[in-house]
Image (tube, coloured by chain):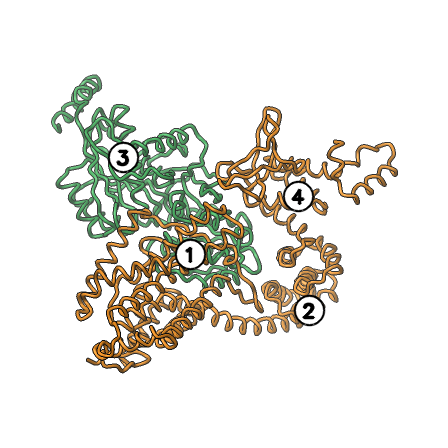
Chain colours: A green, B orange
């Protein structure tokens, strides 16, 4: 198989086509590294589903460079060291061409050395804190300047003068808030008008914090920037609503709540509060209508065409699409294009070919930059009672930048 | 038109007639005042342009049409929909009364009539299947301001008060006439207070030094927390440019700020006490069942948390049953929670009964095996519920009487918190009465103190064990239902509480129910006192460290129970 690919790349364009058609029945192995059990399963299972859906889409239209995608799914079970083991298994034993996976930053950090040592290729689709760049990882995810910074800009534009930064106690909120604090200061918000508070995972008692926010917001012009994770949002928003705080007197922007999370959250307590992502299910574009309709149809009868493969564990009830799902799918298409451009599945060649790849997705065109992050559109949306977002602001062509010193500097320079 | 004019209130008719006489050349123009306003409203609803919407909404203010605030409220909450026919778009809201399938008739915004289909019959709609007319946050702000001005004349004093506070903070001198007109009519003391606060706050920005100083002094006397930051700002500004403001303003602002701050210090103390009490109540409610099964009976029951989860899911199921009977709101639905508490006690009690009969009774003399066995049971239960209800959390909605809060001297008391405190008192008193005033209680105490002797004098120890364990589990079930009002309901619910439960029971002293009560109070209060200083994470760590130290000093907990079974 390798020889054939090698030869085909030598013989030139006409023969390449011939070689690909000849090997149409052949497959290429692709790894899926998402937790299907444990605490993260709720979020990550949806990504596994959308990946299989995308493989099906691609296989139906002829596969990647004529080869059918054959998924190799492993379950790292929300266990960070297990992520590294499973990554090693995918790369060394299954010899997959590319891996799509990880959700939490700690899981990404745990697989990073494995990918660098074995020269693998990983696509990472979930918003994260930046300050990292590996030659073996492509971050389709939102960097801080594609999510947190635009939200704060929007709040400043709305005339907000006081910022309450509330987060779960782990690396993503802490790093993001550190960057935001610097950013707010550069915008002339004094120290005493920025509060930074963290709560443990699974925290349920938000009385003190909400009382403090109420006092903080008593004179108006205040907002909350929330990086609270998962189900701690329920007690927080319940307490928030009970205290008589609303999106009018003190709006909350949450970075970790997407449409998919609303399947387990009471959306009516969150109406009017804001979210910022590079994709919303409510985007009106022909690409998105197709994506949403096809995906909702697919979950009812899940399959991966072109190969002998049975899909299990897809829940057809109440499905939605969300930004991490869209970005997972974008990753697969960018990889496909790069492989076809390089005429090879070899990691080094694909990596070079990936830079500059463009793809017109549901949320508009994305471009892979040399810094392994996307140029993407960012949107600010307001939560509706249906658990969907109404888009109230669109920022086009925001270039992802992992290192905060770079975008903090450019921002201050341009001001 | 003729049909519509019959519905105009008589005052409007007289007015219309007067205007008609005055401007005899336009007799028809003034007649349908209300209809014109409704048309404005419909236009605003269908418009896409914020400026136009704002303008149209401002025209509505002061109208004596109860439909307008109703529609605005619905609009703000995303409950105004559009019915599209070939000729026109008709905005409508849903009738409050819904049928058994949750469908309701549509009320047209333009004339208040029911929407009718081609056959002349009223159409019915399901709210979830309709697309609402959206309102962005900017527009919602405009709607809210209009509603607030409407609400100044609302029949509910609480609504009037909220509106006044909101309008006062905008420091808009245009509102002053509205406030002053209202304060003359107002008879509710709270609203009068809010009105004078709003008037004073608005007057602080006045150019006239006399009015300004008087307003500042008034705010200080009123201990107005809402105006504190405005006053502080004013004090700083005034100190920077004393010529503009004058020494009197600086002095007045300084005195008022001090007065308000010292008042706030007391408020904080009271607030912390309430929050501490409420956290203690949560801990106590969660741990009381364990105080029975582990404390009194000595069974290390790792499945305690999962029994709570059973209770919480019972509340969820009860809620869904009530929803299918009564619809998703109204008195019938709101009473579900009382039924849910009773059901979860029974269901969790039965689970406890089966657990005791099936597993625990074989392990009374082998505590370590009971630890492992109940842990196994807890995993089984979690997986079972994950299988039935899915891995995602389920949503238990709060009945309307448990949502919201009231305010005593500027400290917020949420109804669900007060309910938990009351509930904790209720179950502690209930358990106390059961243990001390009933024959079952006497038997329980006898068996727990000396099983062999109790058996000798004819107590059926087997049955008493079973009943006690079922009672403890029932309490855990009720706790689960109760906590569904505060936190999440999911298969992992038990895991969140089990550590806290054991911590409280062990700290209080195993075997003593009142030890559990005092331990919950101690832990809850300490946590809430430390939290504002140390933050949630460090606060929790400090409490845990303090407990470890305390148990080093008093290994048996706060109250040491002496009994033969424990010593032997």
- Distance from disc 3 to disc 4, alpha carbons, whole Å, reads 51 Å
Give residue B332's mark. none
Mark 2, residue position:
B218
- Closest to the camera, between mark 3 and mark 4, is 4
Mark 4, residue position:
B68
Mark 1, residue position:
B340
Subunit bearing disc 4: B
**Which residue is nearer to you in this view: B264 or B149?**
B149
Percent coordinates x, y for residue B82 in the rendering: 57, 34
Please report whichever mark, 4 or 2, sits nearer to the chain's N-terminal start: 4
* Marks 1 and 3 share the same chain: no
- Distance from disc 2 to disc 1, alpha carbons, whole Å, reads 49 Å
Mark 3, residue position:
A52
Percent coordinates x, y for residue B323 in the rendering: 46, 47
- Closest to the camera, between mark 1 and mark 3, is 1
Subunit bearing disc 2: B
Q: Mark 2 and mark 4 in contact (Cβ < 8 Å)?
A: no
Looking at the image, residue B560 lies above or below residue B469: below
Please report whichever mark, 2 or 1, sits nearer to the chain's N-terminal start: 2
Task: Tell me the SS state at disc 2.
Answer: helix
Subunit bearing disc 1: B
């Amino acid at each position: 198989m390798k020889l054939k690919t090698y030869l085909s790349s030598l013989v030139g364009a006409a023969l390449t086509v011939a070689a690909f058609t000849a090997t149409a029945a052949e497959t290429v192995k692709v790894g899926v590294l998402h937790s299907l059990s444990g605490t993260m399963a709720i979020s990550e299972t949806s990504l596994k589903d959308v990946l299989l859906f995308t493989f099906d889409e691609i296989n139906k239209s002829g596969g990647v460079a004529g080869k059918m995608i054959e998924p190799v799914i492993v379950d790292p079970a929300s266990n960070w060291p297990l992520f590294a083991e499973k990554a090693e298994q995918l790369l060394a034993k299954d010899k997959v061409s590319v891996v799509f996976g990880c959700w939490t930053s700690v899981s990404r950090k745990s697989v990073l050395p494995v990918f660098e040592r074995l020269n693998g290729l990983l696509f990472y689709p979930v918003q994260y804190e930046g300050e990292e760049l590996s030659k073996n990882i492509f971050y389709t995810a939102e960097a801080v300047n594609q999510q947190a910074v635009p939200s704060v800009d929007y709040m400043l534009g709305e005339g907000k003068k006081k910022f309450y930064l509330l987060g779960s106690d782990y690396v993503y909120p802490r790093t993001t808030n550190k960057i935001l604090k610097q950013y707010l200061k550069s915008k002339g918000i004094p120290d005493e008008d920025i509060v930074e508070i963290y709560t443990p995972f699974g925290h349920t008692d938000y009385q003190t914090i909400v009382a403090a926010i109420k006092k903080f917001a008593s004179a108006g012009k205040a907002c909350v920037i929330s990086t609270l994770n998962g189900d701690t949002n329920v007690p927080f928003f319940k307490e928030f609503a009970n205290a008589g705080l609303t999106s009018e007197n003190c709006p909350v922007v949450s970075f970790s709540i997407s449409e998919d999370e609303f399947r387990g959250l009471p959306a009516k307590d969150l109406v009017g509060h804001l979210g910022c992502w590079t994709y919303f299910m409510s985007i009106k574009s022909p690409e998105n209508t197709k994506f949403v309709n096809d995906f909702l149809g697919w979950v009812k009868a899940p399959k991966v065409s072109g190969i002998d493969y049975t899909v299990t564990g897809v829940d057809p009830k109440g499905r939605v699409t969300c930004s991490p799902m869209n970005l997972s799918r974008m990753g697969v298409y960018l990889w496909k294009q790069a492989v076809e451009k390089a005429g090879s599945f070899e990691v080094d060649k694909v990596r070079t070919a990936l830079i500059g790849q463009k793809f017109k997705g549901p949320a508009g065109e994305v471009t892979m930059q040399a810094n392994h992050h996307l140029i993407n559109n960012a949107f600010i949306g307001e939560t509706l009672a249906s658990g969907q977002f109404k888009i109230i602001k669109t920022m086009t062509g925001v270039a992802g930048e992992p290192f905060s010193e770079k975008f903090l500097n450019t921002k201050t320079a341009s001001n | 038109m003729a049909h519509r004019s019959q519905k105009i209130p008589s005052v409007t008719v007289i007015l219309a007639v007067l205007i008609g006489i005055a401007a005899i050349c336009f007799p028809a123009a003034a007649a349908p005042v209300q209809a014109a306003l409704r048309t404005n409203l419909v236009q605003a609803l269908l418009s896409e342009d914020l400026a136009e919407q704002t303008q149209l909404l401002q025209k509505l203010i002061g109208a004596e049409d109860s439909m307008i605030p109703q529609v605005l409220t619905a609009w703000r909450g995303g409950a105004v929909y559009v019915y599209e026919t070939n000729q026109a778009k008709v905005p409508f809201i849903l009738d409050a009364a819904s049928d058994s399938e949750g469908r309701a008739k549509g009320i047209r915004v333009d004339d208040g009539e029911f929407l009718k289909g081609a056959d002349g019959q009223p159409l019915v709609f399901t709210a979830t299947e309709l697309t609402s007319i959206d309102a962005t946050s900017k527009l919602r702000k405009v709607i809210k301001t209009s509603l607030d001005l409407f609400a100044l004349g609302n029949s509910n004093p609480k609504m009037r008060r909220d509106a006044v506070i909101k309008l006062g903070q905008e420091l808009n001198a245009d509102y002053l006439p509205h406030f002053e007109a209202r304060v003359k009519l107002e008879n509710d003391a709270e609203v009068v207070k809010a009105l004078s606060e709003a008037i004073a706050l608005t007057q602080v920005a006045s150019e006239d030094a006399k009015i300004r100083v008087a307003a500042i002094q008034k705010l200080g006397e009123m201990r107005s927390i809402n105006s504190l930051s405005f006053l502080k700002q004013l004090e700083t500004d005034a100190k920077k440019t004393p010529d503009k403001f004058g020494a009197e303003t600086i002095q007045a602002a300084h005195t008022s700020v001090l007065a308000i701050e010292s008042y706030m210090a007391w408020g904080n103390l009271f607030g912390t006490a309430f929050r501490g009490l409420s956290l203690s109540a949560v801990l106590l409610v969660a741990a009381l069942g364990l105080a029975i099964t582990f404390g009194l009976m000595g069974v290390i029951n790792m499945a305690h948390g999962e029994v709570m989860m059973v209770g919480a899911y019972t509340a969820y199921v009860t809620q869904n049953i009530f929803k299918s009977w009564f619809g998703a709101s109204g008195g019938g639905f709101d009473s579900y929670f009382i039924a849910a508490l009773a059901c979860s006690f029974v269901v969790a009690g039965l689970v406890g009964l089966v657990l005791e009969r099936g597993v625990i009774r074989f392990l009374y003399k082998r505590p370590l095996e009971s630890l492992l066995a109940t842990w196994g049971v807890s995993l089984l239960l979690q997986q079972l519920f994950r299988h039935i209800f899915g891995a995602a959390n389920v949503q238990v909605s709060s009945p309307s009487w448990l949502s919201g809060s009231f305010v005593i001297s500027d400290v917020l008391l949420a109804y669900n918190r007060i309910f938990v405190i009351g509930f904790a008192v209720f179950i502690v008193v209930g358990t106390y009465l059961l243990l001390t005033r009933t024959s079952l209680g006497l038997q329980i105490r006898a068996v727990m103190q000396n099983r062999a002797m109790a058996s000798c004098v004819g107590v059926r120890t087997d049955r008493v064990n079973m009943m006690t364990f079922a009672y403890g589990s029932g309490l855990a079930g009720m706790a689960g239902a109760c906590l569904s009002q505060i936190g999440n309901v999911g298969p992992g619910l038990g895991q969140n509480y089990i550590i806290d439960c054991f911590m409280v029971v062990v700290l209080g002293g195993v075997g003593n129910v009142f030890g559990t009560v005092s331990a919950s109070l101690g832990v809850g209060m300490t946590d809430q006192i430390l939290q504002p200083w140390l933050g949630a994470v460090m606060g929790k760590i400090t409490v845990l460290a303090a407990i470890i130290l305390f148990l080093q000093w008093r290994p048996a907990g706060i109250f040491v129970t002496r009994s033969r079974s424990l010593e032997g």
